[in-house]
Amino acid sequence: MSTLEIIVTCIKVLAVFTALQMAVPVLVIMERRGVSFIQDRVGPDRCGPFGLLQPFADAAKLVFKEDITPRHVDKLLYFLAPAFCLIVPTVAFAVVPFGSGIRIGDFTLSFQIADFRVGVLYLLAILSMSSFGVVCAGWAQNNKYGTLSALRGVAQSVSYEIAMCLAVVAVVMSTNSDSGVSSTAMSTIVADQGGTYLGFFPKWNVFTQPIAFFIFLAAMYAETNRTPFDFVECEQELVAGYMTEYGSMKFSMLFMGEYIAMALQSALLVTFFLGGWTLPWVDLGDGSIAGGIASVIVFLVKWFAVAWLYIWVRWTLPRLRYDKLMDLGWKALVPLALINIVATAFVGVWLRS
Amino acid sequence: MSDVMFVALAVVSTASALLLVTRRNPLYAALCMMVLFGTTALLFLKLSAPFLAAMQVLVYGGAVLMLFLFTIMLLNLHPEELGSEKGLTFKLSAGILSAVLAIFLIYAVKFSRDMTGGSFPELPAGSAAFGSAESVGEGIFDAFVLPFELVSVLIVAAVAGAIVLTKKKL
Amino acid sequence: MEHLIAEMKPLSPVLIVFTGALAALLAGVFSKKENSYALPYIGITTVAFAFVALLNYWGRGMIWLLQGAIRIDSFGLYISAIILIACLITFLASIGYAKRLGFEHGEYISLLLFASGGMMLLAMSADLVTLFLSLEIMSISIYALAGMARHRQKCNEAALKYFILGAFSTAFLLFGIALIYGATASTKIHAIAQVQGLKPLLVAGLGMLIVGFGFKVGAAPFHVWVPDAYEGAPATVTGFMAVAVKAAGFAALLRVILIAFPGTWAEYWWPVFWAVALLTMFLGNIIAVFQKNVKRMLAYSGIAHTGYILIGLVSLGIAGSEPYIPGMKALMNPIAGGMLFYLLAYTFMTLGAFAVISLAARDEDDLETLDDFSGLSQRKPVVALAMAVFLISMAGVPPFGGFIAKFYVFKGAIDVQGMLLASGVKEYHALALAILGIITSMFSVYYYLRVVWFMYFREPLEDRPSVAPSWGLHFVIFASSVAIVVLGILPSGFFSVASRGAEALVR
């Protein structure tokens, strides 16, 4: 690795990290204005033009609140948990390709921090740790709401993680890796979705793997603990679940962690199923500056659409019953994903022969 | 550079393993276990086995550890329910036994090379294909197809066993 | 694909057993509760088919399968036959018994078949990876089986203890395999023998393997789980555990030790086994003397039997480490044959004895304490007679199979000693072990005959309602006692089969 590459990678890391931090206020205002729109009311509109500065006001309020540590908490875990919640989804962003790349002489600036050959596995591995923060937070605060919330969080994320992994397996299977590239690399999955069938139909995985898409979509909501699967923090039952005893910046870190996880899942859905940064009719991966910038914009537009879907679903659907959640995960999604894998294998062999 | 990384990882993983068995608070032990799994995964990565590294985190860190945590919280033991602290003799003998075993193994590894003049067998590490998902897949479906299928038999037997022992009404 | 299917064909005995296990599982799920009496017959049919498939490959020489993962040879087939017999006897004995204890369901049959299939593969594996996985299939199924009678606290305790200690021992085994792979870059048992150098690491791996297998066969000092697990588990399962797990464990131990560490390697392992065998025989026999519970007593006697079988391994080691002595090599096959014969005789004695125990004296609990056996000869004369045969055979009194088995094992050790002395080597390890084996057998006569004495010379206790044994149990008790008598009177045919079985390991 040359010095230049190291410097560029460091800059990319900083850029992505900052962008993620900035994505949180954007998502928050989107959510608050969005829910107002859905519920036919106005929402926050006092702070700045159209209330756009509202999240910053919220942040300022949280920062200046007194940082209270209740006496009965488990100190170490109480402090570690918000960090976990924030770190895990942030780290996972390392392999998400958010643009095609710009070629300058010999050097290619790719819009992806690291392109592992086993990028998908890395992602799934990191995602599998995502409920650890919830567990630590829930346990640390030493009250029954927290413990119950953590218990639910683990059960839910373990159950839906399986379905999610299996859905991604089908995507990897249908990714073309004939030319020696690894089909488990994120960049390959995106590049394979570029172009069209018959000249006009997008080659997105959502069309070739519709079942995997819906399984991933359902698992995505469950993994980020959002309605209709928000058992971890449902107010009516658990006050605020694992966040009950948190205040000030530690609360805001948990809160940010949640929104970054949401941003991550949206990015993953875009990457795995909606073609990532590609546009079906235009080749954006030619290495030109315009193509590179356009690809980032394409990615962001898709990402916003999925994030809006998140909000839309949250304020439209009611919460499931807990046993229905488990039934859906184990008795519907997992078998369906397995059948999907077998079907994909059959179709793949049939197409090749 | 590479040696420094190895030593650092080795020290962290050994320390976390030691902490794991000495903590009385089960959740702290689980935390140490996570560090242990993480460093082990990084060691695998250093040995150019990325697939194994990812699986280490995915299966052990993600699934096994989460189930441990689930059980810990479900039982929710109070400190007095954890049982009395083991006596000094027990701790001492356990420590001495593990130390002897460790020294023996270090001796075995070290002198395997020095004394008998033999060298460690060459593994095809370093090549791009080694340890990748593709080569592991080829191994599973070619040379190790029987063990792979046996794993499925094992899982069916284990599931049947678990259900028969725990289901309320059969 | 076709090539793979063709290659799988010689594995048909195992595949039939696994298929039967799945069939039993599904039948158990989809059949009505009142039809569950039919489930054991699925198992019996499966075992019968598997046995026919097994006989089909007997005497066909070695067949290597799947790039050397499996070697089907006379040794593996012999042990598999023992396991299938044990499985069949267990099915027959659990007709009625399983219903009484409330575990007459498909999972019971299925797990027994899964365990048997795993054991058969264990006896045939030529690769440490396959060996480990088949060992796990066996162990996991047996852990669950040990806890089958779920409403009994003792049963749960047995399952949990067995599970935790078993998992612990598996870790040792796996670590040993890892070290051996580190030293040789191969998991193939046959390839390990060819690698020279890196001895300290291999020795460390060998030590770990010995610990792991020691747990599985119940050799001292790794025997602590045996009494609790045997006592708590339902009697039919205990019989299966005692016989089949031991046979499969010994099969894997013999194959790994004799093939991967042959010849001069024996210098490293036979002293270990010498000490283990001695300790096992003494501990097993002496503690058994103090047991009031017959199941526990049989558990300790099982430990003692492990010690006797290990004498054969020690003799093999001593013989193998002195290959230059003329005639020594010729001794090895009969010694190994003696060990295999011992396993066969032990199968019938132990399964028969546990079948008698499963004949409940009380509603749900097994016939366990010595008092339960008081005056059994008056209440059930035939059963008492059979039990007497089993116990006397275990004690090693002629004319039963147990005597011949012990005779072969001790004779092997004495032959090796004679050969050593004839060539001027003045070491008496083999002789010492044989003599100590005979002395400890003397102890065992006491506790075996005490049960017989209770059965024949005590008045029956009044408060013991008796249950009519099922036809399966009758058949098992009858067949086992006949088998033991036949093994005792006409051993030569069986011994030659056992020696053929041993040919795959030592010629």
Image (cartoon, coloured by chain):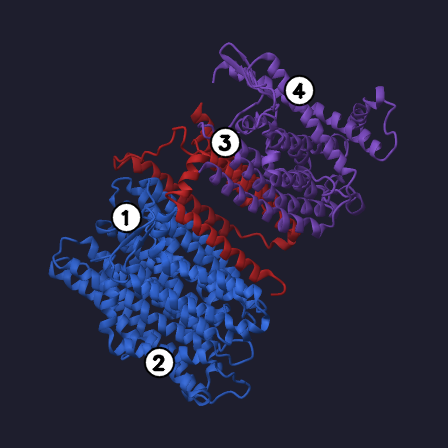
Tell me what residue is drawn at x 39 percent, y 46 percent. Answer: C1
Report which residue position mark 4 lands on. A297
Give the class, few, some or many, for how many residues have Cα within 10 Å of label 2's Cα (few <14, many ≥20): many
- Dot 1: within a 10 Å radius of its alpha carbon, few (fewer than 14), some, or many (20 or more) residues? some
The residue singled out by tag 1 in the image is C190
Q: Residues at badges 4 and 3 in contact (C-beta under 8 Å)? A: no
Observer-nearest residue: B45 or A49? A49
Q: Are marks 1 and 4 in contact (CB under 8 Å)?
A: no
Q: Is C422 placed left or right of A127 in the picture?
A: left
Query: Residue at the location (81% across, 22% down)?
Result: A52
Residue to which mark 3 is pinned: A176
Determine the colour of chain A: purple
Q: Chain of mark 3?
A: A
Q: Give me the C-alpha separation between circle 1 and circle 4.
A: 61 Å
Please, what secondary structure does the residue beneath circle 3 have? loop
Q: Secondary structure at mark 2?
A: helix
| Amino acid tagged 3 | Asn
Label 2 – label 3 distance at C-alpha:
70 Å
